[in-house]
Amino acid sequence: MAKTNFKSLLDAGAHFGHLKRKWNPAMAPYVFDEKKGIHVIDLNKTILKIDEAAAAIKQIAKSGRKVLFVATKKQAQEIVTSHVKEVNMPYITERWPGGMLTNFKTTRKTIRKMTSIDKMMEDGTAKTMSKRERLQMTRQKDKMQKVIGSIADMTRLPAAVFVVDVRKEHIAVAESRKLGIPVFAIVDTNSDPKPIDFVIPANDDATKSIDLIVGLMCESIKEGLSERKAGKEKAAEKATEAPVVEAKAEAVVAEKAVEKK
């Protein structure tokens, strides 16, 4: 399983929290010290929490379910997109469409509409429309693509949601909790960890910190997917071998029956 260490987190600035006056008291168990009015996060606890989250997220991937990543803050958008694309998981980096999870039927309708427009453009149907209609359709499709294009393959609710900034993505967290979907999150000292199922106490503003933690989660997903693939291949081999073994057993039984006669 993907592992991190104290030095990697330290070099990434994951230990830098917010100003003491901005802190959330619920984060007290994860605060190591306070220097020059800024809270310092206990990286030993961060390591434990990363390992716990990585193990859980690996099992989700291994089971074939999806993890939805949410990071709409500017410094996290490109980082999350590059890492998450590699493991073929859904992600939201532009803006969170209200009701995306709690009103998932409507979300799926929008995705189907976007797919329908794509087909019309590919099969030539769009060419039969007027120039104005095509332009309106293209603009509508581009707008939908920007917001939900990255979740087009999400045919059902995700098994978990990973959030980079719980304060900024509070609507995503609230919708997930309402539906009983587990939430993984990078939680800084100014945030409330109580609504989060898998808390990763760390700096949620520094790009290096975000990159390191999201990268570790995606590595765990890769491992889970790899183990799932290996398990399927093994099962297929057994299924192929079974008839051969049965045939041999039947042949032995028949041979012995002949010998007795």
Image (tube, rainbow, N blue to C red):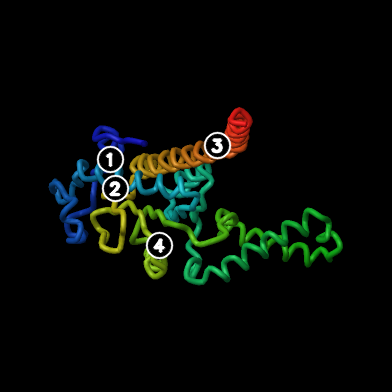
* Above or below 23: residue 98: below
Q: Earlier in the sequence, mark 3 or mark 4?
A: 4
- Tell me which residue sits at (29%, 50%) in the image: 200
Q: Which residue is mark 4?
A: 181
Judged by depth in the image, the label closer to the viewer, 3 or 1, is 3
Choose the circle earlier in sequence order: 4 or 2.
4
Q: Secondary structure at mark 1?
A: loop
Mark closer to the chain start, 3 or 1:
1
Q: Residues within 10 Å of mark 4 (few under 14, many from 20)?
A: some
Q: Are marks 1 and 2 in contact (CB under 8 Å)?
A: yes
Q: Which residue is mark 2?
A: 203
Front in this rendered view, residue 160 or 167: 160
Q: Nearer the viewer, mark 3 or mark 4?
A: 3
Give amino acid for label 1: Gly
Residue at x 65%, y 58% (from the top left corner)? 142
Query: In which image quadrant can residue 232 be found?
Result: top right
The reply to whether residue 36 is in sight is yes
**Residue identifier under label 1:** 13
Which residue corresponds to mark 3?
Answer: 238
Q: Amino acid at mark 3?
A: Lys
The image shows a total of numbered marks equal to: 4
Q: Secondary structure at mark 3?
A: helix
Describe residue 90's horizontal placement relative to residue 134 as left or right.
left
Q: Is residue 119 left or right of residue 246?
A: right
Mark toward the start of the polypeptide (2 vs 3): 2
Left or right of residue 224, residue 194 in this image: left
Q: Residues within 10 Å of mark 2 (few under 14, many from 20)?
A: many
Residues at marks 3 and 4, CA–CA distance in whole angstroms: 35 Å
Mark-to-mark CA distance, 1 and 2: 7 Å
- Image quarter where the C terminus lies is top right
Task: Indicate the amino acid at tag 4.
Answer: Ile
The CA span between labels 4 and 2 is 24 Å
